[in-house]
Amino acid sequence: MDPAALVLFATALLIAVASPGPGITALVARVLGRGLDGVVAFAAGLILGDLLWLTVAILGLAVIAQTFHGVFIMIKYAGAAYLLWLAYKLWTSPVQARTIETEVPKERRFRSFLGGLAVTLGNPKVMTFYLALLPSLLDLSQVNTIGYAELCGIVVATLSLVFACYIGLAERARTMLRSARALQFVNRGSGALMAGAAVTIASR
């Protein structure tokens, strides 16, 4: 593809991803409340969701997406329900003053992955970017196999970079905590953020 078009796409994607939305909020809240356990799988699910929406846009399947609107509604609510479940776990997890660690049960990686995927597929911000904004940035009818691979590479690289920055900052903030009371406050704050992201996804 035209290098200028790829740069334009990468820039627009970077701005869209870096601006906090339900996905970033869920990612940060997850790290603050649970640490790094399962976060890579969750982030991978978020990235795959972006790739799926990119594919839908390039193949001109927006009409099909609208036809199966009910399916996406179900996915959207599944993602919101998953975030609410995590919010509940964070809010109610006990904190041991002796070790200053939460006792949030570990989550299976595949479940974390599916949770991240559901969050992205049901995220109105992501859908708007790929189905509404992307066609105004690129001539999707001219995207060939190589161009598609280039766009996918940009998506993976950009999202990985942004997610890594947010994860690093959230983990650093978490490790700075030195009291059980502070950690409990962060747990409940993270749970509230997670619930807020769920409401945002479900209400749009």
Image: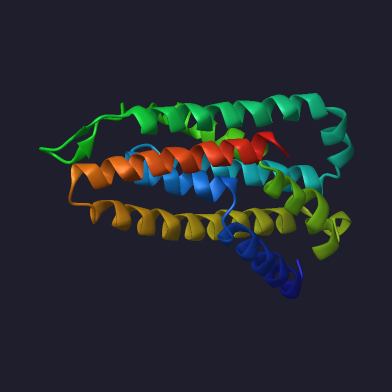
Q: What x and y, as percent, mark residue 194?
A: 49, 39
In the figure, is residue 171 to the left or right of 26? left
Q: Would residue 36 be visible to someone looking at this image? A: no
Is residue 7 placed above or below 39 in the rendered structure?
A: below
Q: What x and y, as percent, mark residue 131?
A: 80, 48
Q: Would residue 6 be visible to someone looking at this image? A: yes
Q: What x and y, as percent, mark residue 190?
A: 41, 43
Is residue 82 placed above or below 33 in the rendered structure?
A: above
Identify the residue at horizontal 27%, vertical 44% (top origin). Answer: 183
Identify the residue at horizontal 56%, vertical 53% (top origin). Answer: 156
In the figure, is residue 193 to the left or right of 135? left
Q: Quadrant of the N terminus?
A: bottom right
Q: What x and y, as percent, mark residue 168?
A: 36, 57
The total number of labels drawn is 0
Q: Which residue in the rendered view is the most extreme toward the left? A: 98
Identify the residue at horizontal 26%, vertical 47% (top origin). Answer: 182
In the figure, is residue 193 to the left or right of 130? left
In this rendered view, identify the residue nearer to me: 99 or 130.
99
Q: Which residue in the rendered view is the most extreme toward the bottom? A: 4
In the figure, is residue 173 to the left or right of 79? left
Q: Quadrant of the C terminus?
A: top right
Identify the residue at horizontal 54%, vertical 59% (top origin). Answer: 157
